[in-house]
Image (cartoon, rainbow, N blue to C red):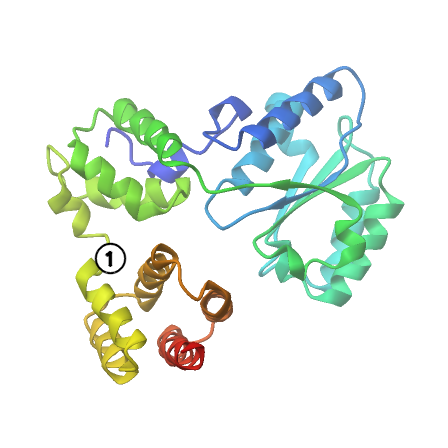
Amino acid sequence: MPESIPLVKKYNPTRLDDIVGQVPVVTILKRWVDSFKAGKFDFPNLLFIGPPGCGKTATAKAFARELYGDDWAMSFRDYNASDEVRMETVRVEIKNIAKSRPFSGINIIFMDEADNINAPAQYALRRIMEDHYSITRFILSANYPSKIIPPIRSRCGELYFGKLSDDEMKTLLRRVVTGESYQITAPAAELIIKAVGGKPRNLLNLLNCVVGLGKSVITPTEVNMFVYSVPEMLCRQMWSDIEAGKVPAADLALIKLSNTGTPVEVVIDQLFDIVAELGKNHDKLYPIFAEYTYRMAMGASPLIQARALLWECGNALKEAK
């Protein structure tokens, strides 16, 4: 790489036009930028909702840059709510910023991962959002909007960020490959797109690892060194065992995969794809996958939760017969 700057930093959008995908979100933000430059501060407090890595934080900062230009940092303050925002922070620091005279236009306070703020602090924040609306706007981001209290959600315009389509991811990959003069084969590009699941940040981080190998041409061999995958036939055999009531066999296969370093989340994702493809017992199986996937996302032991998922699926299929 010509510069020692991580790709995720180098290709972080600085303007709304730099954002790949998220067309409805970008369209409405551009309209608010035009209105703002005409002297109207008519955009509401905002809640950005979507999975990690899909561009919520980058979009908030790009929006601020569009509003204020080179001086955007003077009117924009950001917090990572997962580790910075507590009751005292809300009552003192954030309140003082919210009521301070804006440098230009209005203050913008961005609170990343706001779904990690505890409920008492959220209630305190709600009052600040209301009292200082004339000079301050809040932009909150959340992976799990259900954890945001209703009084805050009712005070925000909600914008939804989805995972990017394969075509959109190819556009981003092509931009980076061209900009960095990388050589990459078509199969390697397809493998990267499939591996990152529609998340731009994941793509940039994965590509950064792959090019770190120093190969003149990126092929599937290099990509596979950083991509966890499970042979499709193995996953299909696991699911066949569960359907046949042989859950211990599927459980043992899962443990063996975990022992070799394969993340069990990858196995569960592939099993879910098989369930979706088969089109049977969705009413019983989907809630099980949803519950245990949520538990893993919330920090519960992935292996324990994945094993429990297999057994609960087995019980559900047994009852369905």
Q: Quadrant of the C terminus?
A: bottom left
Bin the neighbour count of mark 1 within 10 Å (Cα to Cα): few under 14, some 14-19, many 20 and up.
Answer: few
Circle 1 residue? 228
Would you say 164 lies left or right of 39 here?
Answer: left
Residue 148 lies left or right of residue 298; in this view the side is right
Residue 246, image quadrant? bottom left
Residue 85: image x %, image y %? Answer: 66, 59
- From the viewer's perspective, tell me whether residue 63 is left or right of residue 172: right
Q: Is residue 202 above or below residue 296?
A: above
Q: Name the element at disc 1.
A: loop
**Residue, x 40% and y 39% (percent of image)?**
200
> In the rendered image of this protein, does residue 32 appear above or below residue 165?
above
Q: Position of residue 120 (x, y in %)?
A: 77, 67
Q: Quadrant of residue 244?
A: bottom left
Query: Residue at horizontal 35%, vertical 60%?
Result: 269
* Residue most extreme to the top: 38
Q: Residue at x 29, y 44 (%)?
A: 194
